[in-house]
Amino acid sequence: MQIPRHRILDLVKTQCRIFSQSFNPERLRLGNKILRQRLRGPALAAWYPRKTVSFRDLQDTYRPLGLTIFDEAEDDREEAIQIAKSRGKGRPKKKRTAAESRTAKKKK
């Protein structure tokens, strides 16, 4: 005597509910294998070193007090950008679309 299919499905459904598994009698690809895995975010975040205080953070902290701090590296960078622009080697202008050019003409 053969057991009816619906009885076997009822048994499997009960078994899945007891053991906290997903019931998938059609064997569709649902991605449950991926969803059961441990999250990788904390492990990836722990790989990189923690952010330390930067020079810009110090500037932002002391700016409300009226104190200005001179950042020589930033000043050198800005100067190099200006030199490159004067030689025609600066960053290219943004590409304008037709809609942007129409709105720019209206503003003038």
Image (cartoon, rainbow, N blue to C red):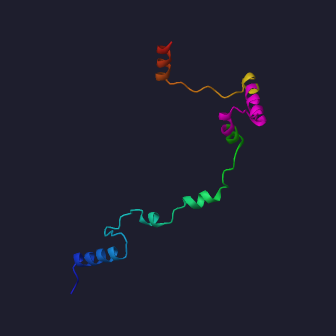
Quadrant of the rendered structure where residue 81 is? top right
Predominant SS of the magenta segment? helix
- Please state which of residues 56 and 40 is positioned toward the viewer in this rendering: 56
Residue 104 point in image, percent of width and height? 50, 17
Left or right: 91 as drawn, with respect to 99: right
Residue 9 point in image, percent of width and height? 27, 75
Q: Which residues are magenta?
A: 60-82
At 32% from the left edge and 77% from the top edge, which residue is drawn? 15
Q: Is residue 20 above or below residue 1?
A: above
39 drawn magenta: no
Spot the residue most to the front: 65
Residue 1 point in image, percent of width and height? 21, 87
- Please state which of residues 49 and 67 is positioned toward the viewer in this rendering: 67
- Please state which of residues 86 and 67 is positioned toward the viewer in this rendering: 67
Left or right: 26 as drawn, with respect to 6: right
- Please state which of residues 7 and 61 is positioned toward the viewer in this rendering: 61
At 23% from the left edge and 78% from the top edge, which residue is drawn? 7
